[in-house]
Amino acid sequence: MSSSSPPPPPAGAASAAISAAEKVDGFTRKSVRKAQRQKRSQGSSQFRSQCSQPELHPLPQLKDATSNEQQELFCQKLQQCCILFDFMDSVSDLKSKEIKRATLNELVEYVSTNRGVIVESAYSDIVKMISANIFRTLPPSDNPDFDPEEDEPTLEASWPHIQLVYEFFLRFLESPDFQPSIAKRYIDQKFVQQLLELFDSEDPRERDFLKTVLHRIYGKFLGLRAFIRKQINNIFLRFIYETEHFNGVAELLEILGSIINGFALPLKAEHKQFLMKVLIPMHTAKGLALFHAQLAYCVVQFLEKDTTLTEPVIRGLLKFWPKTCSQKEVMFLGEIEEILDVIEPTQFKKIEEPLFKQISKCVSSSHFQVAERALYFWNNEYILSLIEENIDKILPIMFGSLYKISKEHWNPTIVALVYNVLKTLMEMNGKLFDDLTSSYKAERQREKKKELEREELWKKLEELKLKKALEKQNSAYNMHSILSNTNDG
Amino acid sequence: MAGVAGPATGSGAAGGDGDDSLYPIAVLIDELRNEDVQLRLNSIKKLSTIALALGVERTRTELLPFLTDTIYDEDEVLLALAEQLGNFTGLVGGPDFAHCLLPPLESLATVEETVVRDKAVESLRQISQEHTPVALEAHFVPLVKRLASGDWFTSRTSACGLFSVCYPRASIAVKGEIRQYFRSLCSDDTPMVRRAAASKLGEFAKVLELDSVKSEIVPLFTNLASDEQDSVRLLAVEACVSIAQLLSQDDIEALVMPTLRQAAEDKSWRVRYMVADKFSELQKAVGPKITLNDLIPAFQNLLKDCEAEVRAAAAHKVKELCENLPMEGRETMIMNQILPYIKELVSDTNQHVKSALASVIMGLSTILGKENTIEHLLPLFLAQLKDECPEVRLNIISNLDCVNEVIGIRQLSQSLLPAIVELAEDAKWRVRLAIIEYMPLLAGQLGVEFFDEKLNSLCMAWLVDHVYAIREAATNNLMKLVQKFGTEWAQNTIVPKVLVMANDPNYLHRMTTLFCINALSEACGQEITTKQMLPIVLKMAGDQVANVRFNVAKSLQKIGPILDTDALQEEVKPVLQKLGQDEDMDVKYFAQEAISVLALA
């Protein structure tokens, strides 16, 4: 205010750096904007109360110790590795961090190259060390609208240590000396519960380790299997109906794929329920693209085990068929093709009608990728043979859409594909095809008439509603006047 | 179907309602099961019309059984159905028959999709109020029990929302049972159900007798607050508010505080976040004494939490917390116990934290008074005005009115100006848009002199912004400024500049002139509009760009009512008639529209 000179707009360095393009349009490509942000890693939420870590002092090498001392030293090293360091602060405790890293490396090598070192008394310390390092509250996502398909994940800062701990955990589980009967005292339900929660980690490297670890645990601890399945169930249900967010869905599904593979026949009701109430609704998730391959694999595994599940599964998929997301629709069509590849002809008959009604809608989708994906079904020999067997049922369902697109679709590739499909269908049953062609117009007119009738019906219903409302009002008014009359009197 | 359609054909079955036989239920049901989802959805949304056509008796005996049996449909249809049924009591014959609606809603309450289930529960809650106490025990309570002991988690989840509506009107014996059911759901095997129970705990506590709250709800609360899943624990924080409201100070101290203290230091940041987020409610619920002893230290910890999410949530609550402290000793307490932490947050590493603080910090000035504001808060405001993050600066600027009341805005104007200028040229158009919105307010507070000197050029620059939304906002801004500073000011400073743009080579800028005239004419009045604006508009009717020409037509329609009849007849009419013969379809259309609206035909 005191200076009287008019303020020149400060053409600062910052504003000069803004490109003209960006000024025109705030919606620059997300990836471009993201690239400007420096890549970040994050630490876990655990350094709250710990103010400073004690400095580590190197212990003697295990290989230099006598066999009597080795066990004792092994446990000391495990205890030493329970101490955690803050990796967000890249300059603190450098020496201690290095000691721990070297020790972890040594431990990994020790359990994988030596036999007879995993003795009963070590289990407790081993599991304690693993728990202390990997179990933690995952931090809030650095990027609240993290899009796993496009954004770079935030990586775990303490990975240099955690990776080695996972490595050690795996070697421990896979060691020929490993005895589940002893380990089950430490690797219990609570342990597994915490392990499962880590699958939400944004770091794909961690999830990959977790996948292998959980798979080993499922394989070795028979007593935990039902529990693990139930907890995965809960995680999925929360994902579908509550949060729509869980980073490790694909990994868990991958494990389930191999679990389903091993299910005994006949399938238990619990497993069928899992298929119908969890896996099928999972198709509604927003981020389906991230785990669809694994999900479809699980579904097909189920159908290969028990073909009678085909009908409910396909009906389920039809119920959740995407309405607006073409990308998902293409995925659904892919899954349907996978299912049709293994379908039994008797099962096919049960669902052909609703299924082909949907396919007929997809074929006439204005999104050419959807139409194209659906039309590709006619390139599949097995599907073609199923269609031929049931041409009397399927042709009338498909005919209207195909006929219409052959005249109207904007995309020439689709029109060409439709001509081929029409030709194939005509060859299957020429007579029916001719009948449908000649009755096409009459059919359309009948539909129009029905539409008019419907409108008429609703109009009448509305009139009735108005009339009733009026009557009610009148009677209320009469009541009111009667009452007020009596009051006056 | 056949069974349903059968009786419908017998006409006059409904006696008095003569018309109803016109609409055999089969036809209506055909509509409800049409193959096209959209049509099905439309029919369901008009379910009340169908019920009306059928009359109350046939709605009860035919329509509702049909609806109950055929609940396998798209979730969207089910959602509409669940909603409709909540308002159906009148259509089935009033409160005496409200229980007829329970079976279909019961099935809907077990559906997987959360929105459907929630809607069904909402409708059930609504209908429960329409039950007589006898009907409630005969029909509604058994339904709640069935849901609460269902096999699949969905029905148990739904049950959680129904306890509190039937409890107050149930008999003593039934009340005991209801509590028992609720207890078991609180320790359910599936976390989904525990979450549902935890989220209804506070609501349920409110309808219970005080003894039961202490003896039953508090232990449930304590358990849920130490659940193994943080998603359950954090819901207990919400319940904490309702429970504390019901208890005496001593009871709160003994029964609630140990759990709350634990929650404020939970190892999961989500729980701590929840404590921060609910802080004002908690503060009110536990009362001033416990606030001073317990909550203030907890709040200090939350303000320096290791997770930015928690700090941001706490920063949002700073003003409310201070406001709600007891008047006595408030100032000292804020100065000594809160302000030091706020100072730290001003230079936080996370921009969300800073911007959360910036959105409330100005409010502290009214609480702390003029001297403290100048001495302690002003440096913080100034620091935030220079923050690297535009959102922080914007939040400060958008709350200037609070400070204005206490110390006047002049104290800030030195720092304000560079901040405004920088925001006005920010690369993100949403930021530019936001600062434009505050211009009229700033203009009012800074005065016309300051405005002309420093800000006027900015306002004019926005008129030629690359983004339409900015140009549009800039035009509206001009109108508001004219309302504030008057027509004379407009005539001298704004109008000439706007009119010059009519000759700009860029047609978008020429159109901006028209948009400005649309916005300003009314505020400027007849004289300026007729003498200065109208000639320009008329001249632009000969523009070579069709978009400009049809906007001329639109502008003439807009300013027509302000002009006098002479100008309309002699100047506007010929131009519009000419545009009415334009070769461009749109120009013709808008010219003709203007002619008919202005009644010049």
Image (spheres, helix red, strand yellow):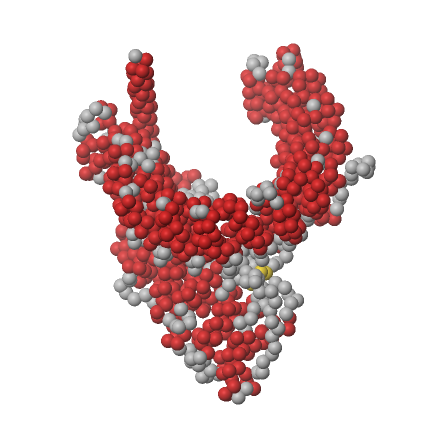
Task: Report x, y in % for residue A404.
Answer: 39, 39
Residue beneath the point at 58% across and 73% down: A101
Horizontal side of residue B360 vs A182, given as left or right: right
Regarding residue B138, the answer to whether it shows in the image is yes
**Front one among B520 and B210:** B210
Horizontal side of residue B269 vs B224, given as left or right: right
Q: Is residue B170 above or below residue B54?
A: below
Where's the N terminus of chain B, which quadrant?
top left
Task: Report x, y in % for residue A205.
Answer: 52, 65
Residue A269, quarter of picture: bottom left
**Front one among A398 and B473:** B473
Residue beneath the point at 64% across and 50% down: B336
Q: How many marks?
A: 0
Regarding residue A315, the answer to whether it shows in the image is no
**Front one among B596 and B425:** B425
Task: Report x, y in % for residue B343.
Answer: 66, 50
Q: Is residue A165 above or below residue A150?
A: below
Residue beneath the point at 67% across and 35% down: B405
Where's the C terminus of chain B, which quadrant?
top right
Residue farthest toward the top in the current orientation of the protein: B566
Residue B460, quarter of picture: top right
Horizontal side of residue B385 vs A189, given as left or right: right
Q: Is residue A185 above or below residue A7?
A: below
Residue beneath the point at 78% across and 37% down: A1
Task: Report x, y in % for residue A474.
Answer: 31, 19
**Front one among A36 and A420:** A36
